[in-house]
Image (cartoon, rainbow, N blue to C red):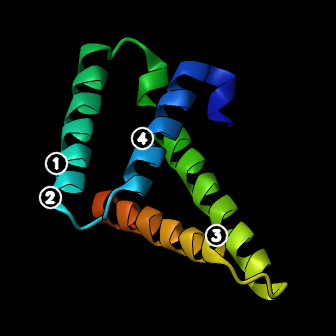
Amino acid sequence: YCLEKFNGCISRGLKYVLAQIQKMEHNSDECEQFVSSLMLHMQKLVNDNSDIPLLDYEIVGKKYLRNAALDVFQYADFCDRSGQFSIDLLKSYIRCAYLITVFDVFDKTPEL
């Protein structure tokens, strides 16, 4: 399922969170505090709104994140294979590393 089919607001929220995480140094205190507070807030929302089945679709969220990571990796791989070495290529690989780190922190890394 595509998360955008269910709720565009949640999709935009996830995109914002990914953008904020990608801007931070992933092992900094700032990033750790941001991700921790975000996860606590999301858990509170799920607990407060347990009657809304959309918030319980953890699989949908994981699939959305996995697809985002795959898109970034495929772009980096395409640039690498075509010989288009640039700062964007390096940034793409760093973003992939950040996403994999997020997966490792909260759950096992999904197979891409």
State the residue position of label 1.
33
User: Do the CB atoms of the residues marked 3 and 2 lie less than 8 Å apart?
Assistant: no
Q: Amino acid at mark 1?
A: Gln
State the residue position of label 3.
88
Label 3 secondary element: helix
State the residue position of label 4.
17
Residue at x 61% of width, y 21% of height: 8
Q: Residues within 10 Å of mark 1 (few under 14, many from 20)?
A: few
Whether residue 53 is visible: yes
State the residue lying farthest toward the right: 82
Rounded to the nearest angstrom, the CA distance separating label 4 from label 3 is 20 Å
User: Do the CB atoms of the residues marked 4 and 3 lie less than 8 Å apart?
Assistant: no
Rounded to the nearest angstrom, the CA distance separating label 3 from label 2 is 26 Å
State which tag comes first along the sequence, 3 or 1.
1
Q: Amino acid at mark 2?
A: Asp
State which tag comes first along the sequence, 4 or 3.
4
Rounded to the nearest angstrom, the CA distance separating label 1 from label 2 is 6 Å
Residue 32, located in which quarter of the rendered image?
bottom left
State which tag comes first along the sequence, 4 or 2.
4
Vertical placement of 43 versus 20: above or below? above
**Residue 10 x, y percent position in the rendering:** 51, 25
Is residue 88 toward the left or the right of residue 43 in the image? Answer: right
Q: Nearer the viewer, residue 108 or 81?
A: 81
